[in-house]
Image (cartoon, grey):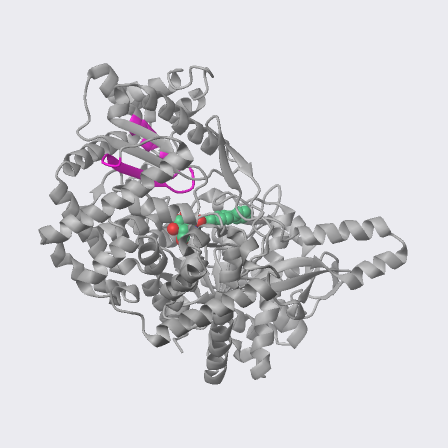
Amino acid sequence: MPRPSHSATAAVTAFKDVIQRHIRYSLAKPPRDLSGSEWFRAVALAVRDLLVDRMLETEARYEHADAKRLYYLSLEFLMGRALGNNLNNLGITNLCRAAADEMGINLEAVRGTEGDAALGNGGLGRLAACFLDSLATLGMPGYGYGIRYDYGLFRQEIDNGYQREKPDNWLAEPSPWLIERPGEACAVPVYGAVSGGANAHDHARGVWTNWRIIVGVPHDMPVVGYGGHTVNFLRLYSARASDEFDIAIFNDGDYVRAVEQKLTSENISKLLYPSDAVAAGRELRLLQEYFFVACGLRDIVQRYLRRHTAITELPSKVAIQLNDTHPALAVPELMRILIDEHSVPWEAAWEVTQATFGYTNHTLLPEGLEMWPVALLERVIPRHLQLLYEINRRLLDHVVQVSPGDTERLRRVSLIEEGAERQVRMAHVAIAGSHSVNGVAALHTELVKTRLVPDFFALWPERFNNKTNGVTQRRWLLSANPALAQLITEAIGDGWVTDLEQLRRVEPHARDAAFRHDFLKVKQANKEHLAAVIKATAHETVDPHSLFDVQAKRIHEYKRQLLAVMGIVDTYLALVEDGVVPLVPRTHVFAGKAAPGYRVAKQIIKLIHNVGAVVNSDPIAREHVRVVFVPDYRVTLAEQIIPGADLSEQISTAGTEASGTGNMKFAMNGALTIGTLDGANIEILAEVGAPNIFIFGLTAEAIDTMRRDGTYHPRDYYERDPRLRRVVDALYSDRFCPHEPGLFREIAAALLERDDYFHLADFAAYVAAQERVGREFTNHKAWARKAILNVARMGKFSSDRTIREYATEIWGIRGI
Ligand code: 26Q
């Protein structure tokens, strides 16, 4: 062991001093009285001091270079914990640990007390968080803009196998990472009416009156890149009622109405909507979307105008990315700013708007496409509706020019869906108002072009492009799996931390018996850790030498947790009824939240628990199969589950999962994938090679054809396959719900009658693929080789690569 140098010990002392200063002057307590979470606060505040210094330096650097900036507008940022990540990226983990040791506290325990910032539902929100890490690591001026929800995604508790939601009051103790900036608060008008304004001849300058003011207060969370050179920020707005406006009503003597209005205003940033696919058409959600977009654009335009005068040159210094359609009201809002506040003529304003925005689509599911009733927009943001009408009029004029007489096409392209209730199609707004439209995996982008919006693709093919998702290896490998990270670094150096393609150099080590041995040792230790997590949370003792088969993601019919359950039921019945013993003992690990209003998803959670109860209590079956559900899946739990997986389940119906990002995290941590030809699985297959992944099931094209022609009859599969029949019959019977007869009948009946997600069509192929998995797992050497090759071939799936592509092909920004 080298002795710490004098300057190292001096740095430890200095850092310790900063922590002690915060204990005294920020917490105002003597150190001996501190609780665990107070230690966290003191350490975090000391780290924050460093972040603030570098954030100010970073801003000066950008300012000096007059750099073009990227603003990532998103209703969701699923950040997880920050302390460990900030220490790692600043490169001061060891220094901080030494300082903590000298004060007699354990850094890992302190890190363990931090709660997750769970301001997101799943994939889309976590992608935004990975992007912020990559932007900062690449030294690029890129900022997140979102909402500082009082309540993040609900905590999941399980009661008798049923999901129960508990509020996530994450700001009960204020976050040390958030820097409130009341001085930069902004005012946003809502409700009221417009007079004059848009019509065919005079579309400019409507006058919006009688609005109510909502105040947005920014809170900045510093985002440090690896190496600590760059600190960007995530700007989150909370909503406050406006004092002045209250005073007006107070003066009218209507005290109660004034207080009521104050409450509604402050509700806007109260909670994250917990749905990740079904667009909840609620007024409060619309207010959220408009509120944060309006705050963000004011801020962006203001920052631009501090140094520049020509508002029409905005796109030379500003790029704005719309994370799905949730922030798509930015399109009419920027038009309003340009036209109403800067007197820019329509044509020029529209050019500026299109050159500024890019739009990313994250879903093909029809129920995921956002639509807002025209009548609601009319009431809440009348001026924006007027502008949308004018955008639509010009769009439809253009369509008439290029395909005269095609009224069907006009109906399909329109921003407005005509029907009993007229609705605005937000995807059309986003596409029309952007110069770039991208999908998040190769297959997904093709389906956006051919299935989702073929008319727009015909109109503007040059706008459409693919940006395959990625994840940050700093959080998902270096920090979540330090033992594997160290093994890799010992083999190839640490260049992979900022250049994931370097993992290729691990490939030759897959043939090295000693390396394989070390790799398996690391995996085994991670499995033992996961077994301890399972014990502590699901209260089940599992064998860490069994195959850990993991499906961790939001619960959704299209993700087909039900197919995995059917596979388990098949194994169980074959064992107890036919005496067929599986080749390897398995532990099936499930984790994930269901949207509170999604009945079927909640039934699936109950089914997993009930199948687990039957299998785990059967003295014979439990020796071969175990089923556990780990409650409250979130970033911090993912960091503990993923490194301990042998097998990663990515089994969505082909053509439904836009990309998936969990698939990348598991493979990067040396799990093999069992998966369909869906989303980024297809690209993972291309990278790792067919022998190193278990692919099964129908293609998106085959499923598309069956859907179109109405040729899918699930009952045919049921009648022809006795194994499948036995499984469906067992679900239909009370075998897994003896105390609640008929509980799963609805699920079984839906499988037979509709099976919207083709479980029955893929069942036989899934079971066969799982049998291959079992066979191959018995050969430890071959399995280790394949797992190592998976790690070595994950270079493409770094969010650094994704961000470089966005930066050069869409945003026109660069590292400074
Ligand atoms: C919309 C309107 C009202 C309320 C909620 C929503 C809403 C919220 C969240 C709709 C959708 C979402 C989230 C979608 C999502 O997470 N999509 C996932 O995005 C990932 C990143 O691109 C992909 O990897 C996943 O395949 C995709 O499912």
For the point 73% across and 50% down, the residue is 263
Residue found at x 25% / y 19%: 620
Say which of 487 and 157 sits in front.
487
Q: Position of residue 729 (x, y in %)?
A: 34, 17
From the top left corner, tell me how far across and down residue 196 is, in percent.
74, 65
Does the magenta segment cover residue 520?
A: no
Estimate the x, y position of residue 121 in percent, counting from the top left: 48, 47
Q: Quadrant of the N terminus?
A: bottom left
Residue positioned 15% across, 46% down in the render: 691
Q: How many marks?
A: 0
Task: Identify which residue, 317 or 184, lies in the foreground.
Answer: 184
Where 632 falls versus 681 (above or below)? above
Task: Using the rendered image of the protein, determine whether residue 435 is visible from the camera's viewpoint.
Answer: no
**In the rendered image of this protein, does residue 29 appear above or below residue 594?**
below
Front residue (pair 112, 394): 112
Q: Which residues, given as a range, are shown in magenta?
A: 544-568
State the residue in front, 107 or 733.
107
Q: Quadrant of residue 192?
A: bottom right
Up-down: is 774 above or below 39? Answer: above
Can residue 551 be seen by looking at this rendering? yes
Report whether 284 appears left or right of 451: right
Could you tell me residue 4's position as x and y percent?
Answer: 31, 70
| Res 781 quadrant in image | top left
Per the image, is 567 magenta?
Answer: yes
Q: Which of the image's four quarters has the C terminus?
A: bottom left
